[in-house]
Image: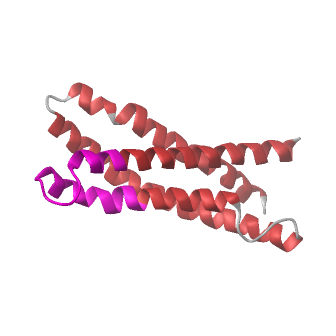
Amino acid sequence: MNGWRERLRCALPGVWLGGLACLAFVATPAPFATLPTPAEAGKVVGFMFAREAPTSLVLAVLLLLLERAAAAERAERGTGSGFSVNMGLVLGAVACTVIGYYVLQPMMAPARSGLGPLSFGQLHGLSFGLFGVKMLLVLALAWRAGGSRLAKAG
């Protein structure tokens, strides 16, 4: 894999993780600490997550393409398979995004009105858990990318 693609493959997980961490630990708590009602804060946070989900999918597609190219090169050299652990981590993060935002989030408004099989709190808890799992998957991806970069430097 050429230099710039390899650097991008190693840098993107850190960028993605930084965005997720910023959202989780800075941007999401801020509206609840400063706005007068939880409903207003919820709208602001909902707006942020509406931007995070497609951003995560775009980053995941880019990383999947880069990881697929790297795995194909390793397979061609006979030092690996066409599928890598990193590809699995990216696909897991995609699954968390799709289920957490595109499946569960549309169910929250009806649940708030008492409709649907799960309560708003249950859906929120599931969504929160999936976001946490996504952060762990991207953390593992960033950790592995950093390790592969250090191994090549040494």
**Residue 129 vertical position relative to residue 80 in the rendered view, above or below:** above
Height in image: 119 above or below 23?
A: below
Q: Residue 62 occupies which quadrant of the picture?
A: bottom right
Q: Is residue 59 visible?
A: no
Q: Is residue 73 magenta?
A: no
Looking at the rendered image, the quarter that the N terminus falls into is: bottom right
Q: Provide residue 115's location: percent of width, then percent of height.
A: 13, 58
Instruction: State the image coordinates of residue 86 (x, y, percent, origin top left).
Output: 66, 57
Main secondary structure type of the part rendered in magenta: helix
Q: Which residues lie in the magenta part?
A: 98-126
Name the residue rendered at 33%, 62% in the picture: 103
Residue pictured at 21% horizontal, 59% vertical? 117
Residue 55: % across, % down: 44, 55
Q: Residue furthest top?
A: 33
**Residue occupying the point 28% across, 56% down:** 105
Q: Is residue 15 above or below residue 31?
A: below
Quarter placement of the C terminus: top right
Q: Give the residue at x 60% y 50%.
A: 12
Side (left or right) of 115 relative to 80: left
Q: Is residue 116 magenta-colored?
A: yes
